[in-house]
Image: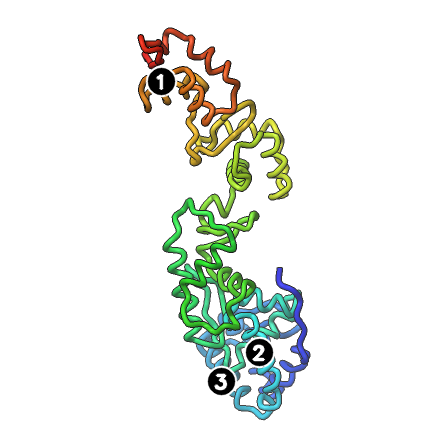
């Protein structure tokens, strides 16, 4: 959440002064269009046109004329320090910032946000890029910088697979390596994360890891996804009770122990490697009960001694050695050759 910022000016007073240069109908059109009146709702061209019995195109003409009239007025010149302050704040926040975050730093209510937004519209040095499939609504003060940010964000996204999860520090480093020739003042973690948040296609999960925003690793949709993330973060096999506890703590989602266990059993991403201990299949653990693991080991390596089998199975399962030995005694599945090595018969 953005922190509240302060300004040396009162945005509503400044806007009121700027609107005073307009005739009543034009003033009402602008106030309605930008939510500057008692009602903070921004009205469409069509709804304003119905109010006055004119076409939406005529409303657009009135809007455009009014904005230019304000920009050329002496009242606008008298308020230039206001626009200089807004320019400095955008520059300090990275030169380009999402509209939502910027407005949120100055006001919590819609009316206050609308007044700051209107000042950005009036300001000659502020450019808005509308939301599209790749990015959120955003404002910038430097077109060349904006293009570099856009290009770099797209490249970082293209280099990600749907399964990738990257630690925040590494992801920031990757982005910095991608973006070229930017001012040193912008090369800090807060600004880079602000730029990264402009993208609709990359995102950050609750564990501080970055990836594609449509991936279940970032946009977790259920208990199994939450479990995958906490086990991956843990980095080694973990008991399902601890998985449930971590889900509740990290994601603020009540995870019942029995439900968590059932979900882990059903998902091929998880492998039971001991009594209640689960690992991720992507770590290379073999699936199945102990006898299945022994069989897979023998199928992969060929005949092995009892100790060799024990050593390899213990890398896959957290079990007692005797459990492995007992499973080897099943003559329907395993037999021993003349050299004392075991092999699979089924």
Q: Is residue 328 above or below residue 39?
A: above
Which sits in the foreground, 174 or 108?
A: 174
Q: Is residue 302 left or right of residue 13?
A: left
Q: Is residue 293 above or below residue 19?
A: above
User: Percent position (x, y) of residue 147?
Assistant: 40, 70
- The dot on residue 65 is 3
Quadrant containing the N terminus is bottom right
Residue at image location 58% in from the left, 34% down from the top: 243
- Tell me if mark 2 has few (under 14), some (14-19) or many (20+) residues whose alpha carbon lies within 10 angstroms of its own: few
Residue at image location 47% in from the left, 24% down from the top: 314
Which sits in the foreground, 25 or 180?
A: 180
User: Percent position (x, y) of residue 264?
Assistant: 51, 30
Mark in front: 3 vs 2: 2
Which sits in the foreground, 56 or 190?
A: 190
Residue placed under numbered mark 2 in the picture: 88
Mark in front: 2 vs 1: 1
Residue 80's image quarter?
bottom right
């Amino acid at each position: 959440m953005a922190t509240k910022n302060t300004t040396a000016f009162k945005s509503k007073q400044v806007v009121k002064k700027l609107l005073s240069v307009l005739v009543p109908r034009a003033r009402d059109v602008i106030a309605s269009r930008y939510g500057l009146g008692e009602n903070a709702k921004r009205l469409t061209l069509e709804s304003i046109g119905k109010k006055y019995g004119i076409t939406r195109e005529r409303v657009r003409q009135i809007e455009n004329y009014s904005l230019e009239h304000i920009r050329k007025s002496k009242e606008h010149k008298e308020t230039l320090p206001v626009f200089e302050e807004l320019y400095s704040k955008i520059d300090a926040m990275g030169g380009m910032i999402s509209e939502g975050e910027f407005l949120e730093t100055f006001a919590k209510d819609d009316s206050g946000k609308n007044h700051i937004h209107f000042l950005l519209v009036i300001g000659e040095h502020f450019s808005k890029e509308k939301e599209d499939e790749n990015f959120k609504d955003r404002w910038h003060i430097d077109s060349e910088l904006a293009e570099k940010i856009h290009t770099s964000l797209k490249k970082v996204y293209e280099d990600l697979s749907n399964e990738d999860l990257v630690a925040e520090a590494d992801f920031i480093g990757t982005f910095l390596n991608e973006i070229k020739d930017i001012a040193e003042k912008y090369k800090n973690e807060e600004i880079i994360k602000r730029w990264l948040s402009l993208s609709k296609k990359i995102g950050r999960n609750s564990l501080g890891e970055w990836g594609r925003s449509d991936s279940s690793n970032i946009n977790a949709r259920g208990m199994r996804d939450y479990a995958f993330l906490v086990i991956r973060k843990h980095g080694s096999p973990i008991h399902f009770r601890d998985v449930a506890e971590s889900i509740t703590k990290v994601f603020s989602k009540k995870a019942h122990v029995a439900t968590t266990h059932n979900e882990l059993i059903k998902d091929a991403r998880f492998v039971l490697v001991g009594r209640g201990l689960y690992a991720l299949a992507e770590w290379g653990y073999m699936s199945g009960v102990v006898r299945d693991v022994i069989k897979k080991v023998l199928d992969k390596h060929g005949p092995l001694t009892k100790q060799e089998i024990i050593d390899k199975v213990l890398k896959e399962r957290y079990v007692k050695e005797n459990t492995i030995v007992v499973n080897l005694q099943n003559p329907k599945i395993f037999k021993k050759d003349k050299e004392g090595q075991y092999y699979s018969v089924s």
